[in-house]
Amino acid sequence: MSKIRGYLSSLRENFKLTRKVHRWVGLEMLVIFVGVTALIAVPVAFFLNWLTGLLIGLPVGLLAMTFWFSRRAMNAAYSQIEGQAGAAVAVIQQMRGNWTITPAVAVTRNQDLVSRVVGRPGVILVGEGPSQRIAHLLANERKKTARWLPEIPIYEIQVGVEPEQISVSRVQRELTRLPKSLRPAEVNDVRRRLDAFSKKDSPVPIPKGPLPKGGKIPKSMRG
């Protein structure tokens, strides 16, 4: 019973967060539920009967409505953290799969930062900040990483609101579209080697990735 209450409470909080960004999300969900249910139920009822039509149409309508809400909730969560330092870190930390992120391996007093992700594609350096400033920070970190791991593919991604950067909502997609160059065992080896090298450097403050107030990033964001 406590699990059900917790689920309903989480659902209510996510709905409130989503409605702040998408004011008419409740009406949209209702329209989709009724429309999809009718689209399925009416033809089935015509050939069979109304009871069968409703038994098939209602679950499909509910599924369509849930899917729509999950997409709206995801978009709302992204919009709450867009442009904040550590936003990309917050998204990547929620991703499923063999991904490991080390936040703020390089950071400036202007809150420009580079985080390092290790996964099947290799090493991905994720920069957050104005393009002109973050490009230099990424280049320095790339040289350092290449010196440690000359044989491992290294990618750079800039996250931000400028035209040449990608938005927070595209971070997960960009990472999962990279070619898988390493086997799982090699990923673990790269991670251990980077940890060993990092201990030789002076530690830097690690900011926590921001999350929307009063809500959580929905599970649908976890790729």
Image: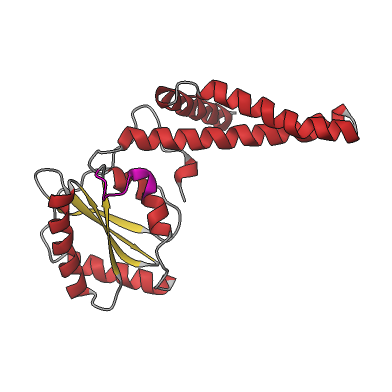
Chief SS of the magenta region: loop
Q: Is residue 42 above or below residue 198?
A: above
Question: Where residue 112 sits in the image (x, y, percent)?
Answer: 16, 47
**Quadrant assignment, res 221:** top left
**Exactly how many numbered labels are in the figure?**
0
Quarter of image, res 180: bottom left
Q: In the rendered view, does 222 fall on the left or right side of 34? A: left
Which x, y percent locates residue 138? 18, 59
Q: Taking the image as drawn, is residue 79 in sight?
A: yes
Residue at point 26%, 46% (across, down): 163
Residue furthest to the bottom:
151
| Residue occupying the point 34% across, 32% down | 212
Look at 54% across and 22% down and name the residue there. Answer: 26
Q: Position of residue 72 (x, y in %)?
A: 48, 33
- Nearer to us in this view, 148 or 199: 148
Magenta-highlighted residues:
162-170
In the rendered image of this protein, does residue 200 appear above or below residue 28? below
Magenta run includes residue 106: no
